[in-house]
Amino acid sequence: MTASTTARRRFLTGMAFISLWMIGFFVFNLYPMAASLYYSFTEYHVKQPLVWIGLQNYLSMVNDDLFWRALYNTIYMVLFSVPLSLLISFICALLLNIKIPGQSIYRVIYYLPSIVPVVASTLLWLWILNPNSGILNTTLAQLGIRGPNWTHDPFWSKPSLIFMGLWGVGNTMVIYLAGLQDIPNTLIEASELDGATWWQRLWRITVPLISPITLFNLIIGVIGTFQYFAQAYVLSADMGSVGSALGAPLNSTLFYSVYLYQQGFVYLKMGYASAQAWVLFVIIMLCTIFLLRSSERWTYYEGG
Amino acid sequence: MRDVQWRCRSWFIAILVGLLITACTPPPPVDAPAAGDSESAAPAAAESATGSDEVLQVWITWGDNPAQIQALFDQYGEANGVTVQVNAPVETDKVIAALAGNDPPDILVTGGPDNVGTWAREDLVTPLDDLISTSGIDLEDIYDAPLSQCAYQGSYFCLPWGTDTYALFWNKDLFEDAGLDPEQPPQTLEELVEMAKQLTIVEDDGTISQIGFVPDFSWSHLDLYTAMMGGWWYNEDGTEITFTSDAVVNALKWEQQFYCNSDYSTDEIQRFKSGFGDYSSPDNGFYNGKIAMMVEGEWQPGPNFIQNYKPELYYGVAPFPYPQADPGRANTSVVSGSVVMIPAGAKNKEASADLLAWMVSPDVVAEEMVANFNLPSSAKAAEDPRFHENDKFEVFLNLMGDPNAVAPIMSPINGEVTTALGQIEEQVLATCADPLPLLEAAQAELQPQLDAALEQ
């Protein structure tokens, strides 16, 4: 048996093992992606032949007020929701990293909301946030504060959604927690011997050492938020006014993916929706490249 | 140790590429989480029917009582030696996916004609003209208004099954409390505004504890108000958008009076509205006496709604008021409801056609609509004494048969048009903005789209 046959056999065995994934990738990811790129240059009809219209779909976006509105809403979420959830999950991770009795119970409690299905948790929050009878405004009322109209007020609807999102930071928190536990005790002990305060330890040891995790969470958060959909969809469904429901109130929760969904699956404008999907792809790609480039300045890889 | 850094990086990149790829695929049609929908109504087992192994699939986008509907279709199955499987309620997303795919149901029933124009445009549903001429379906027997909602560019793409219309409901107890005659509902739109004022209770701190009328309570009724003002948002044949017509503008301005007035702030009414309980519950704003008057449909006096949730409610039903200046519009109502169609991809069109003809026959219409407390779309069915046992239901029957009854005019971009209108309505009510500039802008944007869609 020559070396090359062994190599080939190994290659084929390897391919056989990976083939399931490969087939899935080509059939369910690569092909739909390529097809949607093609559709984005056409006027798509479900049963009729496609009509090539060049860049028309892309140009329509420029003059589509709702498209810009959706983009604005989405960027608002990225700018406010992502940093806030990173901060909150980092703080939670710090707390859950303290060695106290029963810590594992606290960890479970803080992680639990993340396993509640999005639809269920959103409906639950809509109850809590009900301006009239919700537990939040009733509690505020007892303190003499008149709570806002939350999801029914275009100014407060996005903050309400951000607020809901913070309840489910468990996944980010767990990644932070794993990172915190990776920080060598020797560094902490050495700094304690040198008389570092808690704040100095946090700022000069923990934060830099955990910066690669922050980068990861940041990028995942940005990508996820650009695709924000489910909560907004549930919110709209709950607002219930037929026809204008998506994006209610007053298009304040019309996010990019929601608008894309409406164009594609409500109006059956698949070509336009595909073009929007590709623009989103490019936006996310550019953001990601920017974050990765900029991270060279603020991430620290131990031993790097 | 540079390679450690690189290893970390390449992991990031691998994961990111993966995520980006998923980012690009359009979101899947999620299972619509709308309240009340459930997966529990999966195809009801219908193996009871005997005979051949032919199975006909009937999908219905509504259905409070799937078992009753299945039992109805079993009658057809037994008589014809086929199996009919009813799937109700089906979510709209699933319907769209099935229509576009290769395995649609044999019969599709939707709650309204809203999508028929779009689906006809995309060749997703079959024109029914041949079927109507060969199967002996008597179009004369079908009320004009519900029938015309199925006409699209000179062909029928659906046929009405049952149908719905709306009237004014008023709470007689609240009328008495406000010193009004409980047997005298408002006759004109102007009277309604005046009575609503008297029926509204605003507390000292500005909060509302009872309101006379909320024009978009439960959902938008802009269609009824526009019809009452003498028009629609399309011209007669649906080729032109008429957002800026007096009818649409006046309807929106009339609605604004309930949101933008000196008695309470717009913010307060939004707040008050958000406190209403679920539509189908004793906490419904009208059932629990928070709203004195509402616009609602014929199913309300039936066993599934008021009789079920608030049997002691003391209320009346009357035709919706007309504009004082135009008494000729009395008894105007918008008639629209369940329609039956045959998907273009249905495998056995003849079997579908036969089942459809059976469904719209007067006896079957009567049986199903009695069970559901909906209006029969067939005049013969309407003679069934079971429709005449409830005075309140009678109001709706009369409205449907009135010459002033209108059906919604459809277009191939109906979804876009009604969404745009809904957004304008929401905006003018929430911000008290002048409707006209908004309507002008929307019309300018939508008319070219409509022209393009009609040319297809």
Image (cartoon, coloured by chain):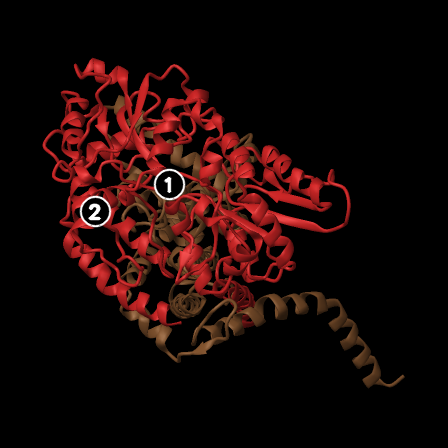
Chain colours: A brown, B red
Q: Position of residue B39 (x, y in %)?
A: 58, 41
Q: Position of residue B92 (x, y in %)?
A: 49, 50
Q: Nearer the viewer, residue B444 or B407?
A: B407
* Residue A105 horizontal side relative to residue B250, left or right: right
Helix, strand or loop at mark 1: loop
Task: Give the quadrant of residue B349.
Answer: bottom right
Helix, strand or loop at mark 2: loop
Residue marked by disc 2: B230
Q: Where is residue A118 in the image (x, y as percent from the top left)?
A: 49, 43
Give the crowd class for mark 2: few <14, some 14-19, many >=20 residues within 10 Å. Answer: some
Q: Nearer the viewer, residue A197 or B182?
A: B182
Label 2 or label 1, whichever lies nearer to me, is 2
Going by the numbered disc 1, the residue's amino acid type is: Gly
Answer yes or no: is residue A99 visible. Answer: no
Residue marked by disc 1: A240
The quarter of the picture where the N terminus of chain A appears is bottom right
The answer to whether the residues at label 2 and label 1 have Cβ atoms under 8 Å apart is no
